[in-house]
């Protein structure tokens, strides 16, 4: 699997350079940009030497099917950053604060005042967990693209991981991810994420239309861990006119720095203003989510879950020092 490690090295390369430039403790090293470019190129040469020797760019069996996703519109805008598109559904799963407190590691507070300031009428004693079911498309950096993959999981926003009673982080302990996609699986596991290799329906898209459904605009999505019965998540959403949560709320939690074991943080900036979002618009959806995934210790079904179905572009800055986000507030 040398090619996989070279891929990871390529993908992390700009990130590592960024960390070493930004990290105060490493500043004495002052890597020059030339050195950085040369080492990136040598990874690239190695990568291609290795794949041409094999005769195929990838030796992992990733589902080979066409996606309906539109191309990544920002790759040329940010050629030296990891960019891509995320098509799919994000929705709010209200759970009791008591359950949230049991699930979120005890050393981290929950910033109830932060989500209440965005959602003043959110039911008392409740906490907004979130579900994301997303297809990652045309993820690339330096013109180097990785195959598409799908991921889903339940995440916990508004977590006070720095104990400053102010900065909101999103805790994402577990994900179901496309089996065979070693780059994505390893990338998630390096955060300490419990990443389950999984099969998806549909295999290469964010969701599929359900024909003859009772409600309009009904779509289905399902994920199952390769190891039978270990983890699964499925959704059935229909379009709705109801606006239970403002779009600003979704923007806020999707752009919180994300962590799993707390050693490093992921800064995934989702842009809601690029052509993949504006051409199709943002649909409001309501539906049912079924999940068996840690940290929940049993299977759950939630009904009347409200969310959004949309495509967004993103820029991702990986493996950053979580402390560097103190006071962080992203703005589009
Ligand atoms: C792109 O990457 C550079 C270096 O890794 C980083 O400094 C910059 O903030 C990233 N750009 C965006 C828009 O995140
Ligand atoms: C998002 O995915 C759905 C389902 O595959 C597709 O119909 C839609 O066109 C995609 N949206 C964009 C903007 O690519
Ligand atoms: C955290 O901040 C909120 C809002 O400023 C305040 O109401 C609350 O008392 C603070 N909590 C602690 C433990 O300081
Ligand atoms: C998210 O909401 C919190 C609480 O109102 C606020 O402090 C923070 O600035 C918001 N973040 C963004 C990116 O809008
Ligand atoms: C979207 O918003 C970002 C941040 O304000 C801005 O840099 C970018 O140019 C905008 N993109 C488009 C396509 O409008």
Image (spheres, rainbow, N blue to C red):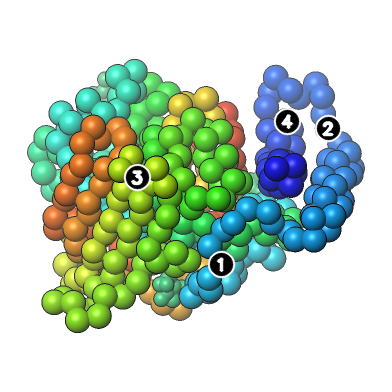
Mark 2 to mark 4: distance in Å? 7 Å
Q: Residue at x 42, y 47 (%)?
A: 226
The label nearer to you, 1 versus 3, is 3
Mark 3 to mark 4: distance in Å? 41 Å
Binning the other alpha carbons within 10 Å of mark 1 as few (below 14), some (14 to 19) or many (20 upward) gives: few
Tell me the SS state at disc 4. Answer: helix
The label nearer to you, 3 versus 4, is 3
**Mark 1 / mark 3, whichever is N-terminal:** 1
Q: Which residue is mark 3?
A: 228
Marks 3/2 in contact by CB < 8 Å: the verdict is no
Mark 1 to mark 2: distance in Å? 40 Å
Q: Quadrant of residue 22?
A: top right
Q: Which residue is mark 4?
A: 20
**Mark 3 / mark 2, whichever is N-terminal:** 2
Binning the other alpha carbons within 10 Å of mark 2 as few (below 14), some (14 to 19) or many (20 upward) gives: some
Q: Residue at x 20, y 63 (%)?
A: 286
* Vertical relation: 271 (above or below) 117: below
Q: Is residue 60 left or right of residue 155?
A: right
Residue 166, horizontal then vertical, whole percent: 36, 30
Q: Which residue is mark 2?
A: 31
Marks 1/3 in contact by CB < 8 Å: the verdict is no
**Mark 3 / mark 4, whichever is N-terminal:** 4
């Amino acid at each position: 699997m040398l090619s996989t490690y070279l891929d990871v090295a390529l993908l992390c390369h700009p990130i590592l350079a960024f960390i070493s430039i930004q990290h105060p403790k490493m500043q004495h090293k002052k890597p020059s940009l030339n050195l950085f470019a040369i080492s990136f190129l040598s990874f690239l040469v190695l990568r291609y030497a290795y794949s041409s020797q094999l005769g195929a760019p990838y030796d992992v069996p990733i589902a080979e099917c066409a996606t309906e996703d539109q191309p990544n519109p920002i790759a040329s805008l940010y050629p030296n950053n990891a960019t891509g598109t995320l098509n799919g559904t994000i929705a709010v799963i209200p759970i009791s604060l008591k359950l949230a407190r049991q699930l979120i590691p005890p050393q981290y507070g929950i910033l109830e005042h932060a989500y209440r300031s965005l959602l003043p009428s959110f039911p008392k004693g409740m906490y907004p967990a979130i579900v994301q079911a997303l297809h990652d498309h045309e993820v690339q950096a330096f013109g180097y693209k990785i195959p598409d993959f799908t991921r889903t999981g339940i995440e916990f926003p508004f977590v006070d991981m720095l104990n400053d009673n102010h900065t909101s982080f999103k805790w994402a302990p577990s994900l179901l991810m496309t089996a065979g996609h070693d780059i994505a699986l390893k990338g998630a596991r390096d955060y300490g994420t419990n990443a389950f290799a999984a099969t998806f329906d549909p295999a290469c898209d964010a969701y599929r239309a359900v024909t003859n459904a009772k409600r309009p605009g009904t779509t289905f999505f399902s994920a199952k861990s390769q190891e039978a019965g270990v983890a699964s998540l499925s959704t059935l959403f229909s379009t709705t006119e109801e606006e239970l949560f403002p779009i600003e709320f979704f923007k806020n939690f999707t752009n919180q720095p994300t962590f799993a074991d707390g050693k490093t943080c992921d800064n995934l900036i989702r842009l809601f203003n690029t052509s993949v979002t504006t051409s199709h618009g943002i649909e409001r959806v309501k539906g049912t989510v079924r999940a068996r995934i840690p940290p929940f210790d049993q299977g759950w079904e939630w009904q009347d879950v409200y969310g959004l179905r949309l495509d967004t572009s993103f820029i991702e800055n990986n493996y950053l020092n979580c402390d560097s986000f103190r006071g962080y507030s992203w703005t589009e």
